[in-house]
Image: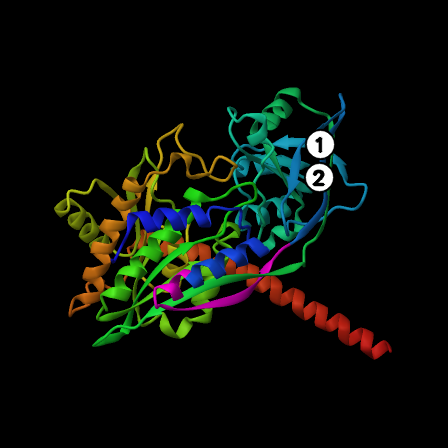
Amino acid sequence: MSVCKERAWKTLEELSFIRVAGTQEELKAAQYLKNECEKAGINAEIEEFEIDMPVISKATFEVLEPYKKEYHVIGIGKSGTTDENGIETELVYIENAVDVHLNHVKGKICLLHGRLNPELSEKLIKAGAVGTISIAGSFYDEKSIADELRPRNTFGKGGQLPGLVMHISDAEELVRSHPAKVRMVLLQDAEKKGISHNVVATIEGSDLKDEILTLSAHYDSVPYSKGAWDNATGSITVLEMMHYFAKHQPRRTVKAVWCGSEEIGLVGSRKYCETHKDEMDKTIFNINFDMTGVTLGHEICCVSASNDVMHAIEYLAKLENNALECKLDTYSSDSTSFAGAGVPACTFARLAPMGGAQIHNHYDTMEHLDPDSFMITLNFALHFAKQLVNTTTNLIPRKFDEVITKKLEERKKWFSEEKDEKKKESEENKDEKTKEEEKK
């Protein structure tokens, strides 16, 4: 037996529990995946790595004038802190934060769409903003969903600007009411660390074993969510493919990486690529899976490589009568970490239509998943992977389309800023320690 729908569904059920980055539940999921590999005769290791786990002790936002009301918010980890009394000032709505909005933010708290990236954070700091509020959710969320604001951390220079997250319905109320004075409080231990884990399994190839195909999927979930669709499905897809290659030895080596801490910024896959830097040149391709198996959905493949690779996948899908939509782009998943490390990559997913299955809340269960739909992605990806590992000549050119290169350079700049900030903090802490020792 190579791949098995019934076995996949059983393991999917067992892996569908809340498993947030850095928690004991995430470690339990890692150990489960390792045990499943070993039962199949596949060597697997758990690799631990350090993550940021800021502890937020207080996060509040209230309107003081012309009316009094407190709104439900959560704090953004590592975004900065206020004092106990918080910041009292005006609120300004800066929409999608184009430059014209930044002329009026000095000394104010800024309400903005979407995430606060390092580039925008730097602009707001230079313009004199003193805090931010990001918008999340949908107008049509029931209250139980609206309260499940998804935790997030910032990086780069965001640590100088305290940030909160608020539901979109509350944000609309604020914009309509034109408050004259508001107060935000954010207290946190931004330097708190935790431990997360990657699970790494290896099936050695035969005559071409020095070349590697890496399969990946993240196995962590967000708070509130059992993460059945996002991303227990992707994790089990990789596990089933490893079952196949354990029974049919490939010519090239196949590695599986189940990544921890994807939901807090692709941390596990970035750490894996850094730790295994020496093998990146040997890795011919990365196939990543993020959310498969939804009953009502459509198949996509986001390719972070060259146009040639995208068209090859597209062509193969047509030969197989597979309704796969291919696009050339970076994807908000672990394939982007591999591409950033110089490895051509892609992510397969099966995405739901508007109003369909949901992720990042308590509705992400197995209710809207289907084993036959799950097999659509698995069967095609396995067929593609078999060709990659068994052809005499490597089919994947080691180059990236210009649009991919630009996006990867932008991301690298953000994360370089984050590393520079950490290095600066470390040096400052070392200097302080030296001064204290000299005083003693």
Residue type at the position of mark 2: Gly
| Alpha carbon distance from label 2 to label 1 | 8 Å
Give the mark nearer the N terminus: 2 vs 1.
1
Residue located 42% across and 48% down the image:
232
314 and 224: which is toward the camera: 224
Answer with left or right where residue 113 lies relative to residue 409.
right
Q: Which residue is mark 1?
A: 90
Position of the C terminus, as image quadrant, is bottom right
Q: Is residue 199 above or below residue 176?
A: below
Q: Is residue 260 above or below residue 209?
A: above
Q: Which residue is mark 2?
A: 107
Residue located 23% across and 68% down the image:
250
120 and 336: which is toward the camera: 336
Q: Position of residue 313 (x, y in %)?
A: 21, 51
Task: Look at the image and give the residue range highlighted in magenta.
Answer: 36-53
Residue located 25% across and 44% down the image:
376
Q: Position of residue 168 (x, y in %)?
A: 56, 29
Answer with left or right where residue 390 lies relative to residue 129.
left
Disc 2: CA contacts within 10 A as few (<14), some (14-19) or many (>=20): some
Position of the N terminus, as image quadrant, is bottom left
Query: Are the residues tagged 2 and 1 within 8 Å (C-beta)?
Result: yes
Q: Position of residue 82 (x, y in %)?
A: 75, 46
Q: Is residue 227 magenta?
A: no
